[in-house]
Amino acid sequence: MYIHGPHGKLKLFTGNSNPALAQRIADALGVELGNVTCKKFADGEVSVTFEETVRGCDVFLIQSTCCPVNDNFMELLVMIDACRRASANRITAVMPYFGYARQDRKARPRDPISAKLCANMLEAAGADRVLTMDLHANQIQGFFDIPVDNLLGTAILTQYFYDKLGTNNEDYVVVSPDLGSVTRVRKFTDKLDLPMAIVDKRRPKPNVSEVMNIIGDIKDKHVILVDDMVDTAGTLCNGAKALIERGGAKSITACATHGVLSGPAIERLQNSVIDKLVLLDTIPVEGEKAIDKIEVLSVAPLFAEAIHRIYDENAISDLFN
């Protein structure tokens, strides 16, 4: 039975991108997923039909815009539009993984800013709010003129390592794969009371990186390598190799929020010096991607708590700590 709040009945729906996560969120909230049919016509156009009323309801649409990115993003837009036309009271786009987030600036002349375009499209479709996790750049929240809540995957990952290592474990050091991830890594070092090191690299072209130097002492240490996402795994595997060969690290455990795992990622991980990669389930890790080196933790409890607080109009600020 759906519960009632200030914006009407709470209703959860999911598209086709990550239905398993949506079900886990629904279970954590103690509600049922709503009945919606998302399919394609013969020519590839997205077709969405809500099989139950959403009139006057507080609707949460759970959809990661992962691969196939354009299909999943379009499906979300059509779902939002359908709910708006069906007189939903409020529509929240729950996007555990926000596709196009890496295209957040003009790197060269005549480049688009695709993340801003996606923000415009979500608003134009009728979304009242966005709930996501670990945007590639926090400034993307400013691309929207509606509220954006950006949950932090480090809350789950740090707890995982805290349960295993405790604090101030002298055998471990936390490493940032680049200068841009230092703020994220500091959350690890603060929680676990561990020292930090940084991999200094340059990126001559997309999905290619070269390690230039290692800042910090990692010799004879077990390394926790922290990133926000793993795409082709080139950066992660190259960094791990340098930490072993140049820095003298004993072992590498990597972790990230989003396991994009595209192209040669799985093969690279299998052949890498990384002992374990801990990911969150913002993107499904299924089939040939579910290798022994990968362990997946669920974000469902955190998203369920955030949805509950948004629904009840309560603060969610302490979820960022």
Image (spheres, rainbow, N blue to C red):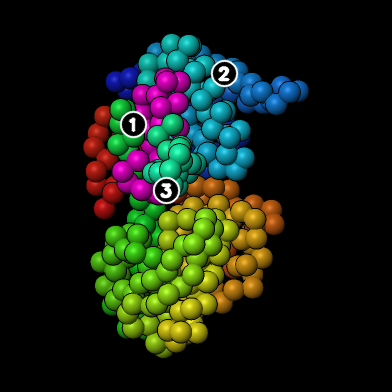
Label 1 Cα neighbours within 10 Å, binned few <14 / some 14-19 / many ≥20: some
Q: Is residue 129 magenta?
A: yes
> What residue is disc 3 on?
107
**Marks 3 and 1 close (CB-CB < 8 Å):** no
Q: Amino acid at mark 1?
A: Phe
Look at discs 1 and 2 and give the one toward the viewer.
1
The residue at the point 28 percent across, 49 percent down is 320
Image location of residue 53, percent across then percent down: 51, 14
x then y, percent, for residue 66: 55, 43
Magenta-colored span:
118-140
Query: Residue 167 colored magenta?
Result: no
Q: CA distance from mark 3 to mark 2?
A: 40 Å
- Element type where label 1 sits in the image: loop
- Is residue 191 among what the camera can see? no
Q: Secondary structure at mark 2?
A: strand
- Image check: 226 left or right of 188? right
Q: Residue at point 62% right, 40% down? A: 68
User: Does 275 sit above or below residue 121?
Assistant: below
Residue 207 visible here: yes
Q: Amino acid at mark 2?
A: Phe
Residue type, label 3: Ala
Residue receiving disc 2: 50
Q: Residue at x 41, y 27 (%)?
A: 120
Badge 3 marks a residue whose secondary structure is loop
Q: Which residue in the rendered view is the most extreme toward the front?
A: 109
- Residue 213, given in percent of the width and then of the height, sits at 40, 77
Q: Is residue 180 above or below residue 199?
A: above
Which is nearer the N-term, disc 3 or disc 2? 2
User: Mark 1 and mark 2: span between their CA atoms?
Assistant: 27 Å
- State which tag comes first along the sequence, 1 or 2: 2
Q: Which residue is mark 1?
A: 144
